[in-house]
Image: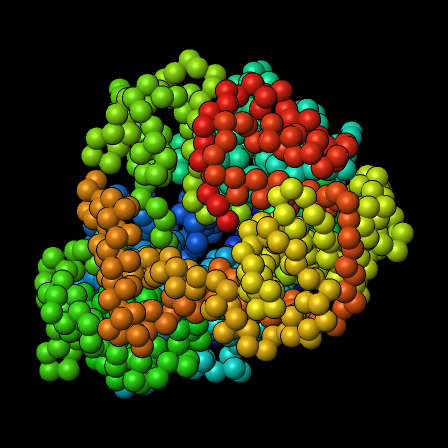
Amino acid sequence: MISKGQQVIQQWYKQKNWHQFPFQQEMEAAYLSDYSGLLNAPTGSGKTFALFLPFLAAFINKHPDTYTTQKNNGLLMLWITPLRALTNDIRKAMQETCDEIGLPWRIATRTGDTSTAEKQALKKKLPEVLLTTPESLHLMLAQKDYPKMFNSLQVVVIDEWHELLGTKRGVQVELGLSRLKNLKVVQDIIATITESSLPFGEGWGGVRIWGISATIGNLEQAAEVLLGNDFPPERIKMVRANLDKKLEIKSIIPDNVENYSWAGHIGLKLLPQVMEIVARSKTTLIFTNTRSQSEIWYHAILDNYPEYAGIMAMHHGSLDNELRNWVEQALHAEALKVVVCTSSLDLGVDFRPVDTVVQVGSPKGVARFMQRAGRSGHHPGAISRAYFVPTHSLELLEGAALKEAIKKGIFESRDPMLLTMDVLIQYMVTLAVSDGFRADELFKEVKNTYAFADITRNEFGQLLDFITSGGKTLAQYDEFLKVEVEDGLYKVNSRRVAMRHRLSIGTITSELSIRVKWLSGGSLGTIEESFVSKLKPGNTFWFAGRSLEFIRVKEMTAYVKKSNSTKGLIPSWNGGRMPLSSQLSAVFRDKLDEVAHGIEKDEEVIALKPLFNLQQQLSHLPQSHEFLIESFKSREGHHLLFYPFEGRLVHEGMASLLAFRISKIKTASFSIAMNDYGFELLTDEDVPIEQVLEDASFFSIDNLLDDIQHSLNANEMARRRFRDIAHIGGLVFTGYPGQQVKNKHLQASTSLLFEVFTEYEPDNLLVRQAYNEALAFQLEEFRLRAALQRIATQTIILKEIERPTPFAFPIMVDSLGREKLTTETMEERIAKMARRYGAEGVAEPDDKRKSRKPGITRKKGF
C-alpha cells in the first residue's frame, strides 16, 4: 500500500502528464526508507525532481491531514549547488511544485548575489527549503547561534557533486556536512531523552545526505567522500538512472586539412560552417574553453553576421551578474538564437529551447564534453546534438577519441583532495567566529571526513597553535593571533578579526579583479588588474561584446565609454590551457594505433589521412607498443622531439626530467616547448641520444622525486601554490569591498611568508602542502610516473629526420615563445619558420590576423 505522500506525488505527475522513470521510483523508495547516498543521473533526466519529490512525500506522510496548512516549519532542506546561476532555476521549479501540490512553503536562495536585506530577512524567518553554495553555508556557520537555524533540518542535497569533488570547495562541503551531522546527532539524543522518539527524518543522525552526480569514473568513492568515514554503510544507497540518453556528435571538418597546423590557427576559419548550423537550429550554445575565446568569437560573429545583433548574447563568469541573468531569462523566453559561452553554462540550468551545442576546441575531457553536450535537448527523451569544432588539424583525432570514449563509457575520475590544511584552518576560525569549538570534539569530527581521515593529533595541534599564537614563526605578530582559548573553548573575540574573516571565507582564488563601469553609470563585469594596468586613457578594448574606450581607474573601478572602433584589445584571464585528461589521452593513443594499422573507420581519420601519410613518409606513425623520438639539426641547434601523448602538464614535467638526466651524461643547456601530444628539447650542442637511450634508467621511476627536485625549480612552483594557500588559510587579507589590496602587494606578502617559513620553520604544514600541490596539480606527478612506466615497456623508435614532421611542427610553433624580442606578428614568424624548414602545406594566416599592425612584443623564455 502506498503512503499519502506517494499518492500526492503520483497525482502531481498525472496532472503534469509526465511519466515517472524507474530511477525516480527507486530514488523515492530509497529516500522514504531513510537511506542516504548518491544519485547518478545525466543532465536533463529529471534528477532534481527525483530527490525533491520524495522529500515532499516524506513531509506529507508526517502531516497527512495538515500538510496544506502547515506553515513556518523551519529549515527542512538545504540544497547546495556549485554555481549561483543554478539556484534561480531550481528555486522556481521547486516553488511551482509546492504551489501546485498545495504546500504553503517558501523556497529561497542565499548566495553571494543575495542582498544584505534579504539575508537579514532569512535570519528572522527561515524558508522550508534554502538553496545555497559551499561558501554561503560556511558564512551561515560563522553566525552566532547558528545551530538554531538547523534545528529542523531533515536533508542536505549536494547538487553537481562531481563538479565539487576534487576541489577545495568540495573539502568545504565535507567539513560543513561534518558539522551538520554532529549538530543533528546532539539534537536527536536530546529528542530521544525528552520524547523517547526521534523526529521526522528518523535514523542515523536524523539528517539524510544525498549527492547528485553526473557519470564519473569513481562514483563509489564519490559517495564515500560525500558521506564521510563514520556513516553506516548499511544506510547508503547508490541510485543510477541508466537512461539511454540519445546523443549525436559530429565533427566539423575543414575543406582543406593542412599537413602543418598549429594550435588555434583553424578556429574562426570554420565560422561559416558554424553559422550554417546556428541557422538550422532553434537555439545554439557555442562553448569556448576560455573567456577570451568567447569574446573573440562573439566579436567575429557580430562583424561577419550583423543580422544576429539583438538575437545573440555572451555569457561568462566575468560578466556582471545582471547581464548573466538577462541572458539566462532570454534563453528561457526563446528570445535568443545563439549564445557564446564558457563553463558558466556547463551545469544544470534548464534551457529547453536549446537544441544544439557547438564546442570550439577540444574540451580535453570526456565528462566535460558530455556535460556541455547535455545542455541541448535538456529534458527527458530529447536528443542532445553536439558539434565539435577543431582549432587545429590534430584536434580532429581528439574528436574521434571523444566519440569512442563516450561510446565505451570511459569517463574521468575526480580524485578527492586530502589534508588541505589551509581549508581546515579557515574552517576552524569560522567556527571560532560564531559560537566557538572545543579541540577534542572538533578533532574527532574532522577526523571522520574523507579529506582529513589521516590527520594526526600532532598536526591538528599545530593548526590550533597556529590560529591562537601564530605557530613557531609568527608569534610576535598580533595580526596572526586570531583565536583565544577560554576554559577550553576556542573563540574569536575581536570584532575586527571576525569581520575580516567573514569577508575572506571561500576557496576560490584568482587575480585581483577590477570592475568595469560605464562613465554614465551601470556595470559590465570584471577584468583582471594585470590587464587594466597596461591600458592608457583612450585605448580601446572589447569586453562583454562591446567596443569600449578606457577613461580612467578610480577605487578599483575602470570607467569606460562606448567606442566606435572595430579594433581593440581583448582581455585575457589567468587560468592557462586545460591539459588532456588521462582517459582521453589513452583513447587518443588507441586511435593513433588504429591509424598506424591502416584502420580508417572514423570520418576524422579519413580527413587526416594526408597528414598521417606525410608523417609516415618523413618519420614514423607509432603503434601502441612503440614510443617515437625524432631528432634533427638546424641552425638553432639539436632538436629532440618526444611523443608520449599524455597532456601538456605531464610533458612539462617529463621534458625537464629527461633534460636533467641527459645533462648527467653530457653537460648541456636545454630550451623546452610542449603541447598535449609531445615536447621538444633544443640544445646548442649535439646530444648522444643513442647512448642516452642505452641507459635503462633514462625512463625509470627510480629516484623520480629527487630528479624532479633537481630538474625543476620546485621552490618557485611551491611558492606559486603558496600564494593561494596563504589566502585561503587567512595569512593575508585581500582587503575590504572596494578597497582591495593590489595584487603585487599580496604576492610580495605571500613570498615573504614563504621564505620565512622555509628558513625558520621547514616543517610548516602549509609549506609542505604547497610542495605536495605543486607535484600533484602542476606536474601531475602520478600521471608522470604512470607514463614513464608505460614508456619503459615500449619499443623506442628513434628517427633521424631532415625537417619537421606534422607532429613536430605545432610543438615548434609553441617554441617561438623562446624568442626574446620581435617586431613580427606570430603568423609572420610561423610562415618564416615553415619556409626555413621547407614545410610545404603550412596554413596561411587569416586575412584579419595579417591586418594587425606589428609591434614590438617581449616574449617570455621557457
Q: Residue at x 59, y 21 (%)?
A: 850
Colouring convention used in this rendered image of the protein: rainbow
Image point (77%, 53%), residue name: 800
Task: Name the residue at the top extreme.
Answer: 564
Does residue 153 appear in the picture of this structure?
no
Q: Residue at horizontal 37%, vertical 72%?
A: 768
Image position of 835 with respect to 141: above or below: above
Q: Residue at x 59, y 43 (%)?
A: 814
Residue 757, image x, y percentages: 26, 69
The quarter of the rendered structure image containing the N terminus is bottom right
- Viewer-closest of 605 and 835: 835
Count of marks, rendered view: 0
Observer-nearest of 302 and 277: 302
> Does residue 687 appear in this view?
yes
Which of the 4 image quadrants contains residue 481? bottom left
Left or right: 649 with respect to 501?
Answer: right
Q: Where's residue 700, x and y in %?
A: 64, 74
Indicate whether 729 appears above or below 459.
above
Residue 734 x %, y %: 24, 51
Which quarter of the picture shows residue 565? top left
| Residue 464 in picture, x, y percent from top left | 22, 77
Q: Is residue 429 left or right of residue 184?
A: left
Q: Is residue 658 left or right of residue 93?
A: right
Q: Is residue 288 above or below residue 279?
A: below
Residue 152 sits in quarter: bottom left
Q: Residue furthest right?
A: 598
